[in-house]
Image: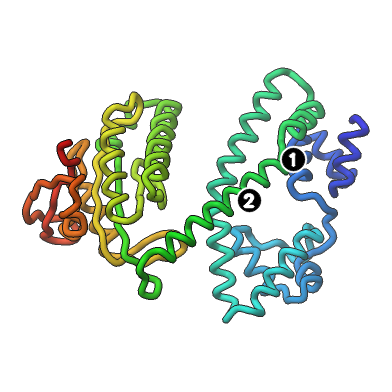
C-alpha cells in the first residue's frame, strides 16, 4: 500500500489490523471513506464514553438508540473523542430542559429527518465506487479516487447553508400565521398520480424511478415557486401546505404542469383549510384527513376543495368555482365540495 493512503488511515484512527483486514477482505475503499467521515481513535466503551461526558451508561444508551442505532456491547471500544463531545453537548442541553423525554424526542426527529438524506448520499457513493471499480483499478486506487472525489467539507458547508436558509424561512412562516398553541390556521393539499398501481406494473425499475423523480421535482419546484412547502412525499403522493391563496395556485399549477409533462402522468389534487396540529414539521387533524380523502374523489387533472377552502377564497377574482354539492367522502361523511379553476382572463 502506498505511504500516503496508509498515513491517512492511521492518522484518521484506523489500526494496522483494520488496514490488513480491509485489504484482505476487499473493503479498503469503505474503510477510507469511513475514516474520512469519522476520524479519531476509538478509545471508549459505553461506560467510558458516558463517564467522559459526565453522565451514566443508561442515558448514553438511550441517546444512542434515539439516533437510530442498536445497543453497543458493554466491552466493545468503538467511541472516540468526537462521540464524547456530542454526548457532552446533549447532557448539557438536558440540564436546561424540562426532562430527558424532550431531548430524546428532539434527537429522534433530527435523526429521522437526516436518514433520507444519508440514504440518498449512500446510493451516490455506492454508484460512484461501482463506476471506479468498473475501470479495472485495484482497491487501493479505488479508495484514493473515492477520497479525492468526495469534497466533504464543501458538502458539509452546503448542507449547513441550506439548513440555515430553510430554518429562517420556517421561522418566518411559523410566526406569520395566527397560532393557538401548537395549532395553526393553514391550507393543506395533496396531489397524487391517479392509476399509479396499474401504471407501475408496466414499468421496469429504472422507468419507475425516473417517473417518481420527475413527479417529485415538479412538485417541489412548483411549491417553492408559489410560496408553499412540500411537507412529505408518500410514494406517488405529495402533501403541501401554505396560505389558502398560495395553496390554490400550487394546486392548479400541479394539475396543469403534470398534464403537459412528458414523464409525469396526470394528477388529481384535493385541498382543505382550517386549524391543524403542527408537530415536528408535519401536520395532523381533521383538515388534513379531509384534504387527503378529497383527493381520492378528484378526477384526473382537477382540483377538488372543501367548502371551508372555498369560503376562504370565494371573493378572490383569480379563481373560479363549480359547486358539486354534498358528496359522501370515505371515512368522513357527507361534505360540501367545489371544483377549483382559474378565472377566465
Sequence-wise first label, 2 or 1: 1
Q: Quadrant of residue 4?
A: top right
Q: Nearer the viewer, mark 2 or mark 1?
A: 2
State the residue position of label 2.
160
In-image side of 245 versus 156 (left or right): left
Residue 156 image point, x, y percent: 67, 46
Q: Residue furthest bottom?
A: 98
Residue 208 image point, x, y percent: 40, 30
State the residue position of label 1.
33
Residue 90 image point, x, y percent: 67, 69
Q: Is residue 202 above or below residue 295?
A: above
Mark 2–mark 1 Cα distance, whole angstroms, equals 21 Å
**CB under 8 Å between discs 2 and 1:** no
User: Could one spot residue 141 in this view of the protein?
Assistant: yes
**Residue drawn at point x = 59 percent, y = 76 percent:** 100
Q: Residue furthest top?
A: 135
Front position in the image: 97 or 36: 97
Q: Is residue 202 above or below residue 84?
A: above
**Residue drawn at point x = 58 percent, y = 57 percent:** 111
In-image side of 262 versus 195 (left or right): right
Q: Secondary structure at mark 1?
A: helix
- The image quadrant where one finds the N terminus is top right
Q: Secondary structure at mark 2?
A: helix
- The image quadrant where one finds the C terminus is top left
Q: Quadrant of residue 181?
A: bottom left
Amino acid at each position: 500500500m502506498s505511504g500516503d493512503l496508509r498515513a491517512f488511515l492511521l492518522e484518521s484512527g484506523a489500526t494496522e489490523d483494520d488496514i490488513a483486514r480491509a485489504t484482505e477482505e476487499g473493503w479498503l475503499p469503505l474503510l477510507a471513506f469511513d475514516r474520512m467521515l469519522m476520524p479519531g481513535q476509538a478509545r471508549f466503551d459505553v461506560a467510558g464514553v458516558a463517564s467522559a461526558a459526565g453522565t451514566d451508561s443508561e442515558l448514553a444508551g438511550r441517546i444512542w438508540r434515539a439516533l437510530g442505532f442498536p445497543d453497543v456491547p458493554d466491552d466493545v471500544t468503538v467511541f472516540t473523542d468526537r462521540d464524547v463531545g456530542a454526548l457532552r453537548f446533549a447532557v448539557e442541553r438536558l440540564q436546561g430542559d424540562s426532562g430527558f423525554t424532550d431531548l430524546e424526542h428532539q434527537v429522534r426527529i433530527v435523526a429521522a429527518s437526516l436518514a433520507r438524506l444519508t440514504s440518498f448520499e449512500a446510493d451516490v457513493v455506492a454508484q460512484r465506487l461501482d463506476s471506479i471499480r468498473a475501470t479495472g483499478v485495484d482497491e487501493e486506487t479505488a479508495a484514493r479516487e473515492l477520497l479525492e472525489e468526495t469534497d466533504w467539507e464543501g458538502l458539509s458547508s452546503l448542507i449547513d447553508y441550506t439548513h440555515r436558509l430553510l430554518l429562517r424561512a420556517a421561522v418566518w412562516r411559523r410566526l406569520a400565521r395566527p397560532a393557538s398553541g401548537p395549532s395553526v390556521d393553514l391550507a393543506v393539499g395533496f396531489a397524487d398520480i391517479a392509476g399509479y398501481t396499474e401504471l407501475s406494473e408496466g414499468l421496469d425499475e429504472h422507468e419507475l424511478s425516473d417517473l417518481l423523480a420527475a413527479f417529485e421535482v415538479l412538485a417541489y419546484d412548483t411549491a417553492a415557486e408559489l410560496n408553499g412547502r412540500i411537507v412529505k412525499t408518500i410514494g406517488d403522493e405529495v402533501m403541501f401546505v401554505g396560505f389558502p391563496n398560495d395553496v390554490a395556485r400550487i394546486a392548479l399549477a400541479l394539475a396543469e404542469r403534470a398534464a403537459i409533462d412528458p414523464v409525469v402522468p396526470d394528477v388529481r389534487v384535493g385541498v382543505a383549510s382550517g386549524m391543524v396540529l403542527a408537530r415536528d414539521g408535519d401536520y395532523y387533524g381533521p383538515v388534513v384527513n379531509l384534504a387527503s380523502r378529497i383527493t381520492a374523489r378528484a378526477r384526473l387533472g382537477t382540483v377538488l376543495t372543501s367548502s371551508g377552502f372555498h369560503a376562504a377564497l370565494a371573493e378572490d377574482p383569480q379563481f373560479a368555482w363549480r359547486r358539486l354539492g354534498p358528496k359522501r367522502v370515505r371515512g368522513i361523511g357527507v361534505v360540501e365540495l367545489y371544483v377549483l379553476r382559474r378565472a377566465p382572463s
